[in-house]
Image (tube, rainbow, N blue to C red):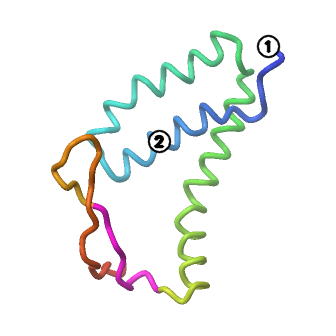
Amino acid sequence: MTSFGAFPSLHCAVALLALLLAWKHLRWFFWVQLPFGIGLILGTVYLRHHWVVDILAGFVLTAISFYAGPRLEEFWRRQGGQRESDEIWIPRDGGGGAGESEWTRPRRVAAP
């Protein structure tokens, strides 16, 4: 164990969060990310950057974040007077390459 490890392991927490979000929103990309996520998690212990308990604590933090994130977003949206069904601006690919995008006109978001 190096003296640079921290509790909890945020590298592992973010890797797991990325996997969960990919599974929820872009399923095919989950399978692309999976080997990297597993490699990062296993490598963190193998290279002695964290103890296993640090990684487990990171996973708990991920579970809390994954559950609380959408609820906190809705809470702040209501505090600002915006409802989930209000208009939002969304980026779309402008076809210019290199990550260029343009903003589409507002559209209504369907309420669940």
User: Mark 1 belongs to which amino acid?
Assistant: Thr
Q: Which mark is residue 2?
A: 1
The residue segment tinted magenta is: 83-91
* Label tally: 2
Q: Residue at x 72, y 21 (%)?
A: 50
User: How many residues crowd mark 2 within 10 Å: few (<14), some (14–19), many (20+)?
Assistant: some
- Residue 69, by quadrant, is bottom right
Q: Is residue 7 left or right of residue 88?
A: right
Image coordinates of residue 102 in percent, x first then y, are 26, 61
Q: Residue at x 27, y 55 (%)?
A: 101
Q: Residue at x 30, y 48 (%)?
A: 26
- Farthest bottom residue in view: 81
**Which residue corresponds to mark 2?**
18
Magenta segment, prevailing SS (helix, strand or loop): loop
Image coordinates of residue 100 in percent, x first then y, are 27, 50
Q: Nearer the viewer, residue 24 or 95?
A: 95
Q: Please determine whether, in this image, residue 64 is positioned above or below residue 110.
A: above
Q: Please determine whether, in this image, residue 5 is positioned above or below residue 25.
A: above
Quarter placement of the N terminus: top right
Q: Label 2 vs label 1: CA separation?
A: 26 Å
Q: Please determine whether, in this image, residue 44 is positioned above or below residue 57.
A: above
- Residue 84, by quadrant, is bottom left
Q: Residue at x 25, y 76 (%)?
A: 105
Q: Disc 2, disc 1: CB below 8 Å?
A: no
User: Mark 2 belongs to which amino acid?
Assistant: Ala
Image coordinates of residue 27 in percent, x first then y, are 29, 44
